[in-house]
Amino acid sequence: MGRLINYAAALGALAALASITACGSSGVVRALDDRPNAGPCPTAGAIYEAARIIEFSDERESFRNIAYSGEITGVRLFCRYVEDEPLLAEVEIDFAFGKGPKGESRTHEYPYFVAVTRRNSRVLNRQNFLVTADFRSGQIATAQELVNRVVIPRVDETISGANFEVLVGFDLTEQQLAFNQAGKRFRLDAGG
């Protein structure tokens, strides 16, 4: 009896698959466009000086005064060329977070941005976001964010995605940026 039910379920799944593939012009099949891109996707990555954030409880820059920290650990971009339209991209961003000795909340929000630039040039578009770290399971947390519909504004189909960059980073205060630019870091095994 159990084999008969499994066999019937398998036949039902095959029938559903056959109905999808039989309709070659259906929206489902068109969404699974497997044509190669007409050109390369823009490069994507985290800006070195904005890839980390340290929030202190007061002005003293010591390990004992850290409330929260964060780091962008990975950036991936997926794009699609469609004739002469602007490129549409999705950006996946991996984050790692820490709750320091002065962190009091079980969750904490971190501001970050996604910017589209001309390669090695000016910013064309910037969007701001918040990512939430959940520290209910401990002092360390991770998150992955997906930013949909990042628009790369190419003028026509002769413009390649290689002319653009998609850059991400934490939205830092002047003090946080200066801390990162000075190359300051804390090693957990180095003491206070």
Image (cartoon, rainbow, N blue to C red):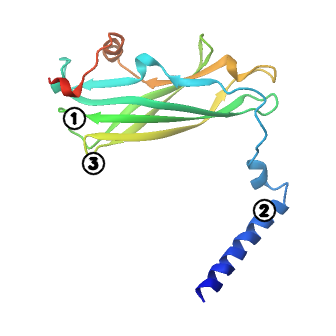
| Residue type beneath disc 3 | Arg
User: In which quadrant of the rendered view does residue 58 lie?
Assistant: top left
Q: Earlier in the sequence, mark 3 or mark 2?
A: 2
Q: Earlier in the sequence, mark 1 or mark 3?
A: 1
Q: Assess whether mark 1 and mark 2 are in contact (beta carbons under 8 angstroms).
A: no
Which residue was labeled with disc 3? Answer: 136
| Residue type beneath disc 2 | Ile
Rendered image: mark on residue 103: 1
Nearer to us in this view, 132 or 23: 23
Please provide percent x and percent y for residue 119: 63, 14
Question: Residue, x 71% and y 75% (percent of image)?
Answer: 12
Which residue appears farthest toward the bottom when viewing the image? Answer: 1
Classify mark 3: residues with Cα within 10 Å, few (<14), some (14-19) or many (20+). Answer: few
Please state which of the two labelled residues, at mark 3 or mark 2, is closer to the viewer.
2
Q: Is residue 31 left or right of residue 101?
A: right
Q: Assess whether mark 2 and mark 3 are in contact (beta carbons under 8 angstroms).
A: no
| Element on which disc 3 rests | loop
Which residue was labeled with disc 2? Answer: 20
